[in-house]
Image (spheres, rainbow, N blue to C red):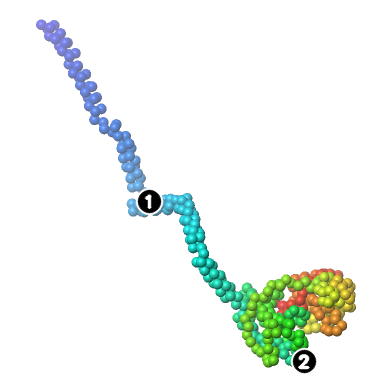
Amino acid sequence: MASVQFRARRAAEPAEPEPEHEKEPEQVEEPAAHVPPAHHPGHHNYDHMKNKFMNEIGHLPLPMWAVGAIVVVVLVLVGCCTFCLFKKCFGKKKKTKKVRERKAGRRRKADNEGGGEGGDKEEGDKKEGEGEEKEQEKLGKLEFSLDYNFTDAQLIVGILQAQDLAAMDMGGTSDPYVKVYLLPDKKKKHETKVQRKNLCPVFNETFIFKIPYTELGGKILVLQVFDFDRFSKHDVIGEIKIPMNSVDLGQPMQCWRDLENSEKEEAEKLGDVCISLRYVPTAGKLTINIMEAKNLKKMDVGGLSDPFVKIVLQHNGKRIKKKKTTVKKNTLNPYFNESFSFEIPFEQIQKVQVVITVYDYDKLGSNDAIGKTFMGYGATGVGLKHWSEMLANPRRPVAQWHVLCPEEEVDAALKVPPR
């Protein structure tokens, strides 16, 4: 009985652990069936990153509203940059297309209108342009007087005043003077004094031309208003031309006339003269050698001239001495080689002017000036350079060619005090 019971127990013992082995797989299967994150790993990562970002923001030493403002500003900047790039890349093409379309439309309209309307418009534009040009051509006006002395055969021209002259200088002013002469000969020219920085100058100067009344009808009186410029060619502001056959000289006349544009004339070549200067400071001696001249203007009927040179020495605008060379007959390229000496103390040499004038000798009438130049105090260009080289090289002769200028231009330059 005891052995039977023991066997029965042994048989029952291995049967007991079997349910335990059967339960273990059930316990492993249950947790595997209830793991939802295995199917959504992205959602888990997003939550993790979000929590981490919010934690980082929470640790910042800025309030939430400041963080939001920074984010808004960044977004606005990004938007502006994007808009600018878009406009730069695509805006030009659209603009050029519109411009082309407009131009094409205008051309089509012009082609379609054509004929009468187009002609009328062109005529209207021309008239408007002419009107504008006339308005722009207001150069000022000049008051003058004319009279004729039948007893002495003299034409008396009075230059009274000018008004509203055109400004020729950078400062909005002019330095006007008036030149008076008769065409076509141009032999005798008169000019007024220069009025500095004045657009409404008063001259009140009178000039006389000795000419028979029978010859006066074929002449044209020219009144030219110039703007004086020390360092360059004088500019013509305007002019008035009066045919003398249209003027009644039986009684004196006085009137205002508007200035008109002057016809541009090429500068007349008068010739060149070669001069040598030498100064000895210790002796106070100035030596001027008139060497030669070339390409002088033809003054005689035969196409030649009888030139001679006149030298005038001035100090502070006053004549001290004058000398002249011999006359060279029938030549436009005379050779003189004549020297003249003047005593000038070293204290005065800085204020001395040497005026050189080339004349055409005339036995019957007055000698006609071919051209003129000057050196020394108040000179510019070659005249100043030559004088400076002479002073910088004492006791040594310095030669230089000088271009002859119209007599009236040099006289005007001599009248104006140096700046």
Position of the N terminus, as image quadrant, is top left
Where in the figure is residue 380, as x and y percent of width and height? Answer: 74, 73
Determine whether, in the image, residue 107 is placed left or right of residue 210.
left
Q: Residue drawn at (20%, 21%), measured in percent from left and top?
A: 23
Q: Is residue 346 visible?
A: no
Where in the figure is residue 224, as x and y percent of width and height? Answer: 68, 79
Residue 170, image quadrant: bottom right
Neighbourhood count class around disc 1 (C-alpha, 10 Å): few under 14, some 14–19, many 20 upward: few
Q: Secondary structure at mark 1?
A: helix
- Kindly give the residue lying farthest to the left in the view shown: 1
Residue nearer the viewer, 56 or 119:
119
Q: Residue drawn at (16%, 10%), measured in percent from left and top?
A: 11
Where in the figure is residue 194, as x and y percent of width and height? Answer: 69, 81
| Mark number displayed over residue 211 | none
| Mark number displayed over residue 71 | 1
- Kindly give the residue lying farthest to the front in the view shown: 115
Kind of residue at badge 2: Asp
Residue nearer the viewer, 217 or 237:
217
Residue nearer the viewer, 143 or 372:
143
Neighbourhood count class around disc 2 (C-alpha, 10 Å): few under 14, some 14–19, many 20 upward: few
Residue 213, image quadrant: bottom right
Give how far apart the Cα atoms at labels 2 and 1 are: 103 Å
Q: Residue drawn at (73%, 82%), measured in percent from left and top?
A: 219
- Kindly give the residue lying farthest to the bottom in the view shown: 151
Position of the C terminus, as image quadrant, is bottom right
Q: Secondary structure at mark 2?
A: loop
Whether pointer 2 and pointer 1 mark residues with C-beta atoms closer than 8 Å, the reply is: no
Image depth: mark 2 or mark 1 in front: 2
Q: Is residue 53 above or below residue 351?
A: above
Q: Residue drawn at (19%, 13%), measured in percent from left and top?
A: 14
Q: Is residue 270 visible?
A: yes
| Mark number displayed over residue 152 | 2
